[in-house]
């Protein structure tokens, strides 16, 4: 599982698979489920994530050990390749 936070848009993408998303379904305002060609859930996109969840607590519980201090929220860097791009991404935190 990979956690991708985009500070510029306050979006969080939770990636379960590297498979390409071919269908997206908005299940509530600002929460989109991405599915692959076989109908398997490959990711969850959460807009305005900072208003929906406490990101510091979320990352401290779910992020890889080196990011559990929440430093990944302030770091800049990676772009996540997606079917729909929503801006430059920040650090990717992974958990196996």
Image (tube, rainbow, N blue to C red):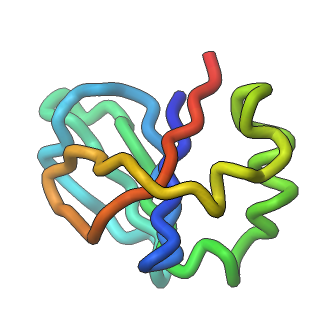
Seen from this angle, which residue lies furthest top? 96
| Residue 29, x across and y down, in percent | 47, 83
* Quadrant in which the C terminus appears: top right
Residue at 73 percent across and 38 percent down: it is: 67
Relative image position of residue 5 (x, y in whole percent): 52, 58
Residue 28 visible within the image: no
Where does the image place residue 38, in percent across and percent down from the top left? 19, 28
Residue in view at x 17 percent, y 61 percent: 84
Q: Nearer the viewer, residue 74 or 46?
A: 74
Residue 8, quarter of the rendered image: bottom left
Residue 84 visible from this viewpoint: yes
Left or right of 76 in this view: 58: right
Q: Is residue 63 left or right of residue 78?
A: right
Residue at screen point 67% across, 76% down: 50
Q: Residue at x 39, y 55 (%)?
A: 33
Against 24, residue 86 (above or below) is below
- Given residues 73 and 55, the one toward you in this image is 73
Q: Relative to residue 87, is residue 35 depicted above or below?
A: above
Quarter of the figure with residue 57 = bottom right
Spot occupied by residue 3 in the image (x, y as percentages of width and height)? 54, 43
Left or right of 5, for residue 96? right
């Amino acid at each position: 599982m990979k956690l991708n936070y985009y500070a510029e848009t306050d979006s969080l993408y939770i990636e379960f698979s590297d498979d390409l998303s071919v269908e997206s379904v908005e299940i509530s305002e600002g929460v989109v489920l991405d599915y692959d060609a076989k109908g398997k859930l490959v990711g969850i996109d959460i807009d305005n994530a900072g208003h929906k969840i406490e990101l510091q607590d979320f990352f401290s519980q779910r992020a890889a050990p080196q990011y559990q201090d929440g430093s990944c929220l302030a770091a800049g860097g990676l772009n996540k390749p997606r079917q729909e791009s929503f801006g430059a991404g920040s650090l990717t935190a992974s958990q196996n």
